[in-house]
Image (cartoon, helix red, strand yellow):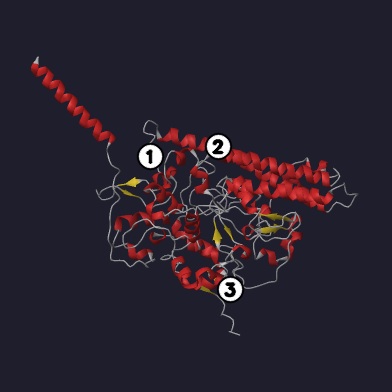
Amino acid sequence: MRSMKITVAMLAAALALVLAACTDMSDPKTPQFKTDLPETEIRNSSFKDEFPLHYETFLRNNESEIMTEYGGSVAYNKHDNVSPLPEGYKHAQPYLKNLWLGYPFSYEYRAARGHTYALKDILHIDRINRYDEKGGLPATCWNCKTAKMNEFVGEYGDEFWANDFNKFREQVDMDDNTIGCANCHDPRTMDLRLYSVPLKDHLAAEGKDFATMPRNEQRALVCGQCHVEYYFQDKGFGPAKKPVFPWSMGKNPEEIYEYYKTHGDTTTPGFEGNFVDWVHPVSQTPMLKAQHPEYEMWGDGVHGAAGVSCADCHMSYVRLDGKKKMSTHHWTSPLKDPDLKACRQCHTDKTPDYLRERVVYTQDKIWEQLMIAQDISVKAHEAIRMAAEYQGAKPAGYDQLMIQAREMCRKGQFFWDYVSAENSVGFHNPTKALNTLAQSQRYSQQAVDIAIRAAAFTTAEALSGDIKELVPPIMHHSRELQMDPEHMASHKWFKYLKLTPKAEKVWEGNKRLLPAPAAS
């Protein structure tokens, strides 16, 4: 009997030790490194010898041919749902050139390839004017493309942003300076760090110190340096064209939209003090262009709220050469892995097929609503155009009705764009995505309804039809085509743009094709 009591006591003590081990287990420690690299190192190739296995996975970002159902890494035209890959793809939005008419995005907008192509793609994209010495966009556009920003801002300070983009073309190496190691790591210790000025500014305004934040927050914020909504500041609010995150009122689309109503210098009647990216030439609506708010969408989605970081899904653990596990630096969709190992780190009871089907099911539903929101946004611009050109007796309050219609058009398109520009087809936060698209449809339809009232209901019958017959999608448009009178006569909306003079191409990538003009 005594021996049995001793045995029971020993088992109880052992069980207590096991439970203590489970409850008191400390978090795994972050590996510590000390390299021979200087703090100022930004060249990706300099990290190869120090971290050959990490660098091997980084080079896998060069892969540019694998697609998932709704995305991938083929740089197809995101408005072309007619042509096959690589020029077009079935899940494309045909009205992008219409909705962004008069803004550089209407010239060319392609699906993103891997981060290793960031510089190559922006240096060849038609959004930046390559037919002139000046690119027509500020140097701010370099911000999320290269760690060379550390040097640019170090040299120019806040005067950097308002420079012209093309001024710096010849100063970058398209391979060695593209997004890489120094964008996220201190080269000396490989500790996570921020290079992004707007994110540093935001954290400082909130009284937060990145260095003391929990590791998981740091892992998300290094992605949130660029995968966010941002804008180029008007000079009345600080350094001109400096990038700013519009988060002071919150990170939801409604809060961001309200922020933009008080952070601009436009004097357009009814929009005084609003921030405006451009004025749509067809409806004369002061517009906003959303960027790519993955961080904002993820943050209060089911994964973000559960503490699942960006890196948990997009930089899953791997083992190479029998080594200790490490995070892959091939930043890509977990759906490209046939086994969905990133997803099954948590969803251990589910098969890859089941998980993939759930993702695509969610994206199907959001895509359907995205396309509806897109069509109503186009109809809103057309309804306002028709009301602005209405020649009959104007109803009472006509001018105020037009302001209201343009306000709803601006808001509806921004809410559509908030989901359209976010690179998960809403999967990062399905609830927010569907709600945002429902709001977009409501606002855009209000724009249509108000514009019909402004035109004394004379446009109601025309606008009740299929928008694709009333306003066909613009399938072809570029800076070169805008120099061609025949092209500019090919769509009724082009008459609201100016024919641009013929010009030779000055730039190809980071190389000059024509001699620099003589210094004056």
- Three-letter amino acid code of the residue under disc 3: Val
Q: Nearer the viewer, residue 309 or 342?
A: 309
The residue indicated by pointer 2 is 431
User: Label 2 near label 1: C-beta < 8 Å?
Assistant: no
Image quadrant for the C terminus?
A: bottom right
Image quadrant assignment for residue 483: bottom right
Helix, strand or loop status at disc 3: loop
Foreground disc of the pair 1, 2: 2
- Would you place residue 406 above or below residue 182 in this image? above
For the residues marked 1 and 2, what is the alpha-carbon distance in whole angstroms?
27 Å
Q: Position of residue 376 (x, y in %)?
A: 70, 44
Q: Residue furthest right?
A: 393
Q: Position of residue 18 (x, y in %)?
A: 22, 31
Foreground disc of the pair 3, 2: 2
The dot on residue 506 is: 3
Image quadrant for the N terminus?
A: top left
